[in-house]
Amino acid sequence: MLLDTKLPFRYIIKDILPDAIRVFLISVVFQLIKQFYSAWLPLIPLQLPTVLGGSISLLLAFKISQSYDRWWEARKVWGSIVNESRTLVMQANSFLEADELLPTGADTRLKTLAYRQIAWCYSLGQGLRGLDPMASIANYLPEHELEYMRLHSNKPLALLTLHSIQIKSWFQAKTINSFQQVQLDSTMVRLCEAMGQGERINSTVFPSSYRLLIYLFIYLFLVTLSLGLVETIGLWEVPLLLSISITYFLLERTARYLQDPFSNRPTDTPVTAIARTVEINLKQMLRESEVPEPSVAQSYYLM
Amino acid sequence: MLLDTKLPFRYIIKDILPDAIRVFLISVVFQLIKQFYSAWLPLIPLQLPTVLGGSISLLLAFKISQSYDRWWEARKVWGSIVNESRTLVMQANSFLEADELLPTGADTRLKTLAYRQIAWCYSLGQGLRGLDPMASIANYLPEHELEYMRLHSNKPLALLTLHSIQIKSWFQAKTINSFQQVQLDSTMVRLCEAMGQGERINSTVFPSSYRLLIYLFIYLFLVTLSLGLVETIGLWEVPLLLSISITYFLLERTARYLQDPFSNRPTDTPVTAIARTVEINLKQMLRESEVPEPSVAQSYYLM
Amino acid sequence: MLLDTKLPFRYIIKDILPDAIRVFLISVVFQLIKQFYSAWLPLIPLQLPTVLGGSISLLLAFKISQSYDRWWEARKVWGSIVNESRTLVMQANSFLEADELLPTGADTRLKTLAYRQIAWCYSLGQGLRGLDPMASIANYLPEHELEYMRLHSNKPLALLTLHSIQIKSWFQAKTINSFQQVQLDSTMVRLCEAMGQGERINSTVFPSSYRLLIYLFIYLFLVTLSLGLVETIGLWEVPLLLSISITYFLLERTARYLQDPFSNRPTDTPVTAIARTVEINLKQMLRESEVPEPSVAQSYYLM
Amino acid sequence: MLLDTKLPFRYIIKDILPDAIRVFLISVVFQLIKQFYSAWLPLIPLQLPTVLGGSISLLLAFKISQSYDRWWEARKVWGSIVNESRTLVMQANSFLEADELLPTGADTRLKTLAYRQIAWCYSLGQGLRGLDPMASIANYLPEHELEYMRLHSNKPLALLTLHSIQIKSWFQAKTINSFQQVQLDSTMVRLCEAMGQGERINSTVFPSSYRLLIYLFIYLFLVTLSLGLVETIGLWEVPLLLSISITYFLLERTARYLQDPFSNRPTDTPVTAIARTVEINLKQMLRESEVPEPSVAQSYYLM
Amino acid sequence: MLLDTKLPFRYIIKDILPDAIRVFLISVVFQLIKQFYSAWLPLIPLQLPTVLGGSISLLLAFKISQSYDRWWEARKVWGSIVNESRTLVMQANSFLEADELLPTGADTRLKTLAYRQIAWCYSLGQGLRGLDPMASIANYLPEHELEYMRLHSNKPLALLTLHSIQIKSWFQAKTINSFQQVQLDSTMVRLCEAMGQGERINSTVFPSSYRLLIYLFIYLFLVTLSLGLVETIGLWEVPLLLSISITYFLLERTARYLQDPFSNRPTDTPVTAIARTVEINLKQMLRESEVPEPSVAQSYYLM
């Protein structure tokens, strides 16, 4: 997630460069053509690029708006992961009758569940980003559960299955009653839903034809505008075309980054930081005194 | 689902061709008319096509946006099919008390349910696409269930009914209690809902009048623009009209394809691939070691 | 629901005619005025109709979008009616313990419920369209239930009440237990909700001021455009004004029809066809072999 | 709620007048200035008011769309009040075992509940409109409940509390079991939610800055347009400015009225008529033969 | 929340000033450049700023619309906090069997719960605004609960945990049964969800790139407009550029404030006033006669 602080210049430049160069070359070529073949070129009325500019704006508005919706939905999914993680532990805590207690006063069974839930958050976040979903979760799980996970291709789903097996064992040991089992199961249903929603956003490619069409419109706009300006403004045309088209390209680029909120880029949903928040919350609910610090932002973004 | 890779040229060309030819003919005819009857033609001010261009953009923006919503809703429906399939098996697993076990350690009853759920996903996907819903599900179901399905015109609904009969038998055999029956039934309600939502999107025709009106606007735009350009740009008019109108037609076409996400086209929701994912997930939850490979994308799309 | 087939020419003409004649007269009158009093008329710059054209487009975009939303919501409501009807019968089937069976193997009590549910669908559809809600449901209900319905002004609500009385009797006869009663009641809640949503869409008039304002804008646009074209294009003005304004009127008309999806017009939500689908599904769930054919579309629409 | 009938002329005029006069004065003043100081005035190119006109359209489109959403949400809230009122009585009817019966065959306890629910609808509607929430509900409640209400500042909340006390007493008298209590409680939760949603819409002021900014834009548009028309169209300018700006003001006004759907105006959500519908439905469910008539519309609106 | 009353002039001025000065300087500089180097400057056709104006409008429309959605979502979250607070106390009241009663007739346990709920509302509101979440809640909680809160970094979550511990103790003391525990737990789930949603809106930075791009577009617009007006309108240019660009900046500013509805500014969601409403409602449900007054608005806003 980009922070509200000043974006570094190089972050913006890096994105602009290829398109800027392409537009620069195009406008230079047009300048040369106009220099030597101006007699052959039509004088296109400027209403035409105006219409095209309107179409570009509307297409970009559509793309910006849908990509924002995807980004916001991804954030909502992770928001509900926070909520359901807290709920799961709070429910288990209020349903479990006292058994073997930890020094902190928390139930050992509760601790197993809560730690597995923390691992689930980290693992899901890593997996969505295409990183190793087993990284950095070894501390939260016993060895045989790690073993079980290795058999599954979908690691977070394996963790949910382990949750459900643990809850089943509580029910069979009559530690919780039927109602409580069903209520915990409902929380599991919502966790499973949030996981699936994250995977859906991640695996669904935004219709790529629209990007092509926006590009087509921008280049048409540049060509007609350049032809419309024949002999009016001379060399000033180059910076003019450059600055307008770059703004359009930047808009498209920004929207494209928001579209894919789990791609290990500064514009990502900050899943690691959110998982860290869950870890802090759950550990404090277990009355542990050693909790990690909240994630600290990079210079201008938070992962 | 189109992938983010380069769309092949022929895929785009195939779509463009008929409209391109039509617009080409129109602009040639106009050129000829203007050549011989220019005295009779009005000089339409270019503000008029500008207004029409704005209207086209807004209508297309509406159509693009609604078709995207349909496409995204279809994807959400299949996302929740994934979630509920996993949930169903996870619930059954945690509710069923141990009975006859498979070599993998999974319950035989659970396997029947899970396999029927896999068949349901494949069958629903095929049916929505207008293909044979009984194809490729024979391996997942016993013969008498296939027999039962043949009596029903809605095959996936028949499979859900079989689910509900199985769950009823568990309840009557006191394998699960009332709460658990009701909780499984709630998952069934959601599966039934997802199925109905898919059918709704598939059977509801997007108001076809809007397509006609967009076409009407585009042709009006072309005519007024062509008349507005009388004697200004000569033969350059042909490629100009061609390139602008083709972009509009392509936009309309792209939106139209997204509108109908279950029509056996490369732009479809990838229901077969999703059903395959469900198959892999459920089989791994049954601890089976032989699971199929995930669906591999075609050159530029995934079904 | 209009189908994707070719709309008949007369369907479109019938709608266009009154507005077309009005605009035709207006433009003829303007032509005459301009012929004789051109000296008195101001030369309005064409930027003005451009601005007005933009406003018309945006207002129409708003109206089209909201009317589409109403239409889609109506379709969703009937989609969930399909889902809940199937769910109700599936639940009752899995909750009822075997009792008196029909030759088809279905429970007699289940058949009463399912047939009443079919009647409810037909009755609700008829009622929303302002037709007789008692028509064509006599075959699905015993005489004393028809009698009971006559006392109620809201017929579908009377049928739901009969459902709830039947479910109560099952509970009191201990055929179903408390959980199952509550689960069936939840389905009833959703049916009651879907009914109310349909009534809401039907009884809520889209703010009529907006139609007036769109008309005002279109006429302002025509007047300023006509004045802006003084002496430029002569008699060509008539077909020009006619074709542009007719497209706007058609857009407004199309949106208005979608707004009211239960008004017994070809653009309606196809409630009769949907009720027929429910009838087929439920009868097949009762293992009946005689089921009606699905509704066949009229030439270009499906009711 | 404005009906689809012809809006009376005075209703529109009353709204237009102040703004119309203001714009009339402004354009007259401008005419005078232009008459005497035309040499000092700049000739503003008409592209400028075009841009401003576009901005006005977009801002108005935003405001119209959001105000429509508020209005529609208010209507949905009252739609769900209808649904939940029916559900509450239907549930209580199916849960209560026969006790003391009224001559109509309905249960006395059910009648108390249903009448209180009717009172709740009327009281909530009155309260939202800023009218006396105790008016016209005396007939539906016993004296001690009216007494209890007087102690509460939020009258509808007091009625819900009375509902919950009555349901508690049923549970304690073992008339209903735990499941049924919880199911009724879920309906109470939804009623409480609908009430809160109505209050939220009512108490949340639409960001007032936007109105100021729209006004600012309209006046800027008028000024630049008037300056752009220097010497072109003479006195024709006055009706021209008047007609365009009035349309914008009317749009803003219409949107503003929809924004506040509980303000005792003809554009209100028809809460009294809806409460009347609930009364009729519930009384018929109690098998009462004397039910009031549905609310009749005023000449052009329904409250 | 800004009220519908007249916004004070200084509130608007304070916001406008820095941008106004900047634009003023820019236009003065341009005037000077044009005075001395007019021969070197291109005459940019005015269609170009028109296109840019359209893009600015669309980007602003996007930003206004999304920021409004955030603001409205924040308001909805607090609306559901009101609903769930009332629901929680109403449920506890109807589930708890009479025990030790307060002089007002309310249950002591209920009072503890209700007061903690009031504290939760105040604490959550303070925390979201970045103020001390422990301020002003000492009166509602016993000392040992305040002590417990100090160990947690997320104070409202600590209060919810205390709720869940209290409900667990009721269940273990058999004061409430399993169903009732689960129903109260469902309310807790929704409270936890509302809290998480508020935190999500608060911690998610609106993509900051869009602000930069809007600014870029506005400055491009100013430059091209100024160049397009070379020698047309002289010094009139300064107020013209000033008034148009200020309106754009004001729009952007207004949207930015709505985006962050918990930032201790007059445009905030009025969380303190809402928490006060909850306090009044809950205390009256406890039959307390001493309730605080509703929050009174500041001159033009309500916190």
Image (tube, coloured by chain):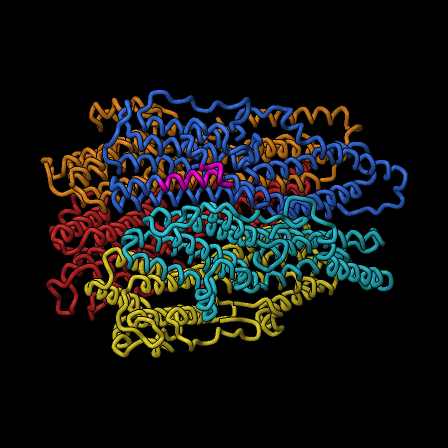
Chain colours: A cyan, B yellow, C red, D orange, E blue
Q: Which residues are magenta?
A: E148-165
Is any part of residue E106 visible from this angle? yes
Image: D197 above or below B91: above
Q: Main secondary structure of the magenta part?
A: helix
E290 falls in the magenta region: no
Q: Residue at x 20, y 63 (%)?
A: B174
Quarter assignment of residue D138: top left
Q: Residue at x 19, y 33 (%)?
A: D112
Image: A150 above or below C44: below
Q: Position of residue B84 (x, y in %)?
A: 38, 61
Image: C293 above or below A48: below
| Number of on-image labels | 0
Of A265 and C214, nearer the camera is: A265
Of D21 and D106, nearer the camera is: D106
Of B191 and E295, nearer the camera is: E295
Quarter assignment of residue B207: bottom left
Left or right position of E227 against B229? right
Q: Position of residue E135 (x, y in %)?
A: 50, 29
Q: Position of residue C235 (x, y in %)?
A: 62, 50
Left or right position of B89 against D33? left
Is any part of residue D205 visible from this angle? no
Q: Position of residue E194 (x, y in %)?
A: 44, 42
